[in-house]
Image (tube, helix red, strand yellow):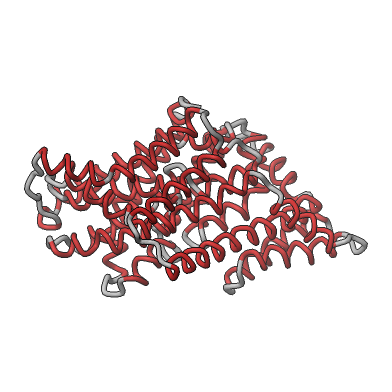
Amino acid sequence: MSPVLIGLLGLAALLAVILLNVPIAAAMAAVGVLGTLFLDAQASVFSLFGTATVQALSSQELIVIPLFILMGGFAIIAGLSKEIYRLSHAWIGHFRGGLALTTVGTSAIFGAICGSSVATTATMVQVALPEMRKRGYSNALIAGSIAGGGTLGSLIPPSVIMVVYAILTQQSVLDLFRAAIVPSIVAVLLYFVAIRLVLLRNPQDGEALPRSTWGERARATGQARLTLMVAGVMLGGIYSGIFTVNEGAAIGVLMVLVTCLVRRRLTRENFIQTLIRAASNIGMIYLILIGAEIYKSFLTLSGLPAATVDWVGGLDLPPLLIVSVVILLYILLGCLFDAMAAMILTMPFVFPLVVGQLGYDPVWWGIMNVMIIEIGMITPPVGINIFVLHGMRPDLKLRQIYAGLTPFVLVDVLRIVIFLLFPGLMLALV
């Protein structure tokens, strides 16, 4: 049996094991070890675990992930999300559907602090949903603006998924953060457009609220000064080069923690709970990266990624058509698998193809990856934001959630098409 065929069988086995709800880290490690032994019975598979573990634990770039996760946890305790919501409401709440627009705007700002779509969605369920319910917003628009807006936590820097991509492909985290600025702005604007189009069709789904006075806007801005300062100092310092991404994340954690203390919201109980949740999430990410390294070693030994690149290169198709097919397959894969898992599983094949064979910029492809992942977060049956929203509020029917998310998915696809056709827009600030 040829090594390439063994690699294909290993890939099929991995997908089957994941579909049986085996954790992705364990699945990748098991298939990687068994596949390596099948290809080379004399291989020292235990050294694979040691090498992959040391590589992950000694990575300087990975330090930023625990810091971002801790910052998100402390930001929730500090009540930053409520301040951002009041600030957004004061400035844009008077438009028709203003609370839906406010939810998306708040998700964007809060995403710049916590770096996680799941955390952003869960926070908006608690902050935005009661207000929207009180004002008579439809369940579909509530679900769409919360779950759709929650995906901005992955796209707007700092982003945990971007850091994972940077580690896997050895790219600059700062370059990825800079490249995400324009797509982030476009994402927010297109979500605003989606909400307005929904309300043009169904005006009763969201009412217009009274316009805030300049005094109310000033008070809301003043109340959010600490939140704005945290985001401004951290992101401004990173982008200006005053400090590195790791240093910026550490300063962000310190500032949010001090905010918790100043406001006397940090207790022994919520401090310990935040550390436990952070440790759980951090451990999961590290295990996934370790498993991915073992799985990648097996694939490299089989020669399957190189064979895939050679096969696609021999098709003599335009690069734009090939990458469009890859994006479409990613979107379909995201409907069946966890979005980050889909990215990690396919990276050994797709990255050499898109960047090496087709010649696309690796930073551009990284942001495109994140935008595709966003679609996977809000598409059935495995959309993680859908699970979070429905799990926290079972009274929101799944059909209402899916209906509310449809316009957001459509503008997400439009955004991908825009940056596929005009990649220079994304790379202008890199």
Left or right of 418 on screen, residue 357: right
Kindly indicate the quadrant of the structure image that contains residue 261: bottom left
Name the residue: 63% across, 60% down.
Answer: 288
Q: Nearer the viewer, residue 116 or 24?
A: 116
Kindly indicate the quadrant of the structure image that contains residue 284: bottom right
Quarter of the picture containing the N terminus is bottom right
Kindly indicate the quadrant of the structure image that contains residue 387: bottom left
Q: Nearer the viewer, residue 68 or 93?
A: 68
The outermost residue toward the left is 210
Name the residue: 61% across, 62% down.
Answer: 283
Q: Is residue 360 above or below residue 215?
A: above
Residue 210 place in picture, x, y as percent: 6, 48
Q: Is residue 294 above or below residue 187?
A: below
Q: Nearer the viewer, residue 19 or 80?
A: 80
Residue 353 place in picture, x, y as percent: 65, 40
Left or right of 116 on screen, residue 283: right
Name the residue: 77% across, 50% down.
Answer: 300
Residue 356 place in picture, x, y as percent: 67, 35
Count of residue discs: 0
Q: Nearer the viewer, residue 128 or 342?
A: 128
Residue 329 place in picture, x, y as percent: 52, 51
